[in-house]
Amino acid sequence: PVCLGGFTDITVSVSRPAPLQVVSGFVPFGMAFAQNSSISALIQGEPRQTGIFIFTVRATSASGTADHEFTITVNEISNDSELDDAFSNVPYSQQLTLSGGASGSVEWTLVSGDLPTGLSLSTDGEISGTPSDTSTFTYGFTVRAESGAMACEKIFSITVSACADWTQTTWGVPVTHD
């Protein structure tokens, strides 16, 4: 699996010299297939579309042809970069998601920056807790989602605002006596 927009370099090779070509299906949009030696080809570039891409590469030599099917899964962290606003002393929860065809377990980690005080990121991708900031501030941070050999990163921000203090006022209603 690879990540949307991240440079990817995959080598396809055979044991004997042979021209290699894609004969069915497509490599992900934004990537190119090019033979780089007598026994290998490169699939490289920055994928621009999520999904599962299945294609067949054919090797042709004097002894015949051989086809091999390949699959490239392109994933992305699909949340908007600006996460929902949080409010001081109000419970917060935001689930991060990986889309595009990821399979298996995904582990989430904070790579750089800081979450607002009182919030944490779980390994299953949930940012939760109760922020304790008393003034308005925007936090920037980078999160990584890993699944096997695939790792996607994305920069996020959360703005924490202080809640207004409300006091209850009892309104008097005039009472008339006879």
Image (cartoon, rainbow, N blue to C red):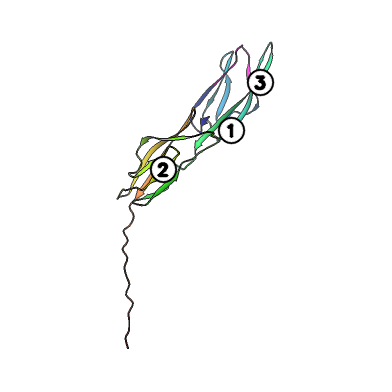
Amino acid bearing label 3:
Asp
Give the SS element for disc 1.
Answer: strand
Q: Is residue 122 above or below residue 131?
A: above
What residue is disc 1 on?
52
Give the SS element for disc 2.
Answer: strand
Which residue is at 60% across, 31% downward? 53
The region drawn magenta spans: 11-23
Which residue is at 40% across, 48% downward? 92
Q: For marks 2 and 1, give the one nearer the viewer.
A: 2
Amino acid bearing label 1:
Ile
Q: Quadrant of residue 123?
A: top left
Give the SS element for disc 3.
Answer: strand
Q: Residues within 10 Å of mark 3 (few under 14, many from 20)?
A: some
Q: Earlier in the sequence, mark 2 or mark 3?
A: 3
Q: Is residue 151 above or below residue 82?
A: above
Q: Earlier in the sequence, mark 2 or mark 1?
A: 1
What residue is disc 3 on?
67
Q: Position of residue 107 (x, y in %)?
A: 45, 34
Q: Position of residue 113 (x, y in %)?
A: 35, 37
